[in-house]
Amino acid sequence: MERIIRDNTNRLPERAAAFARQAHEGQTRKFTGAPYYTHVERVAALVASRSDRPELIAAAYLHDTMEDCGVTYETLARHFGHAAADIVRALTNDDERKKQLGKVRYMIGKLTAMNRDALLVKLCDILNNISETQSANQARSYFLIVDGLLSSPPPAWDKTHADLAEQILAVYRKNWAQE
């Protein structure tokens, strides 16, 4: 029985990758026109370079499926377990609240309240986004969000989060600081 459970857990990222690819079918990245799936694939690779936990890597593949594809929490929990579904739910934005507060203020508050796992996926998401954006305004927003987190680190903050924040700021300085 343990082997069956372990085998299912080991295949969790692969099943999540296939699910995300299908869920994002036909979607493209705003600035590059690349298939949207390439973004979740890169975020999952960034997460996998920092953790070997299958549910965390699966959540990275699935991180935009609730927000962008209308996939329900229940569907994610049934197919990938509550641990992965909980992370995806934590990463899903409340668009109305974001509109009320403004993107930067909303995101700082949201990231500050995240657990260690969701924060890791979100910072990997931001790193990929700031690396690919062609919008100075979007890059500036990411800079302000990370700067806000660094000025008052969340309770879940650790060295991995700090290293990711520094990478995000380095990309910003390299590509956008002179704007």
Image (spheres, rainbow, N blue to C red):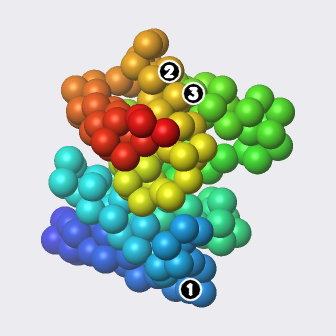
Q: Note whether residue 22 is visible.
A: yes
Instruction: State the residue position of label 1.
Output: 25
- Residue 117 screen position, x and y as percent: 38, 41
In the depicted structure, whether residue 139 falls above or below residue 151:
below
Q: Note whether residue 85 is visible.
A: no
In the depicted structure, whether residue 134 falls above or below residue 65:
above
Is tag 2's residue or tag 1's residue first in the polypeptide sequence?
1
Q: CA distance from mark 1 to mark 3?
A: 30 Å
Instruction: State the residue position of label 2.
Output: 148
- Residue 71 screen position, x and y as percent: 65, 69
Report the mark closest to the observer, 3 or 2. 2
Identify the element where label 2 is drawn.
helix
Q: Nearer the viewer, residue 4 or 55?
A: 55
The N terminus appears in which quarter of the rendering?
bottom left
Label 3–label 2 contact, CB within 8 A: yes
**Residue at 50% across / 58% down in the picture?**
134
- Marks counted in the figure total 3
Q: Amino acid at mark 2?
A: Gly
Is tag 1's residue or tag 3's residue first in the polypeptide sequence?
1
**Residue at 73% across / 44% down in the picture?**
94
Instruction: Give me the disc on residue 108.
Output: 3
Q: Residue furthest front?
A: 178
- Residue 120 screen position, x and y as percent: 36, 41
Q: CA distance from mark 3 to mark 2?
A: 6 Å
- Residue 40 screen position, x and y as percent: 42, 66
